[in-house]
Image: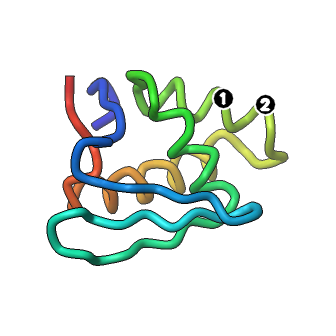
Amino acid sequence: MNNLLFKRNDADFLATKMGDEMVIMNKESGQFLGLNNVGVDIWELLTTTQSLETLVNELLKEYSVTREQCTLEVQLFTDQLKKQNMLIFI
C-alpha cells in the first residue's frame, strides 16, 4: 500500500468526535470502531487523498517517534481500515 493513494470512505461511515477520541459507525452493519487520538489524527488527514508516506510525514510533525515506528504503526492502522472497507483507493 506504500505507493497507493487513498482517502476515507465517508459514504459508508459516520464519525463522531468525543474529546480526544472518535467513534466511527458502519452505516450498513451498525458496527462501531473507537479511535484514540493518533487514530483520530489519521482519520482527519484522510479527508483528502493521502499516501502512506504523506500520512507518516504529517504525523512525524506532531509526535516524537522514529520514522520506522511511525511507518509501521500507520501501515498496520491503514491495513485495518482497508479490511473494514473504510478506505477508498484512488
Quick check: marks 1 and 2 in contact, CB under 8 Å? Answer: yes
- Which quadrant: the C terminus? top left
Residue under the point 28% across and 37% down: 1
Label 2, residues with CA under 10 Å away: few <14, some 14-19, many ≥20: few
Q: Front-most of 88 and 76?
A: 88
Left or right of 75, for residue 79 = left
Residue type (three-letter) at the residue carrying disc 1:
Glu
- Whole-percent x, y for residue 86 in the image: 28, 51
- Distance from disc 1 to disc 2, alpha carbons, whole Å, reads 5 Å
Q: Front-most of 19 and 53?
A: 19
Q: Which residue is mark 2?
A: 61
Give the image quarter of residue 7.
Answer: top left
**Total residue callouts:** 2
The secondary structure type at the circle numbered 1 is helix
Residue under the point 49% across and 27% down: 53
Q: Which residue is mark 1?
A: 58
Residue under the point 33% across and 62% down: 80
- Whole-percent x, y for residue 82 in the image: 25, 52
- Whole-percent x, y for residue 83 in the image: 21, 61
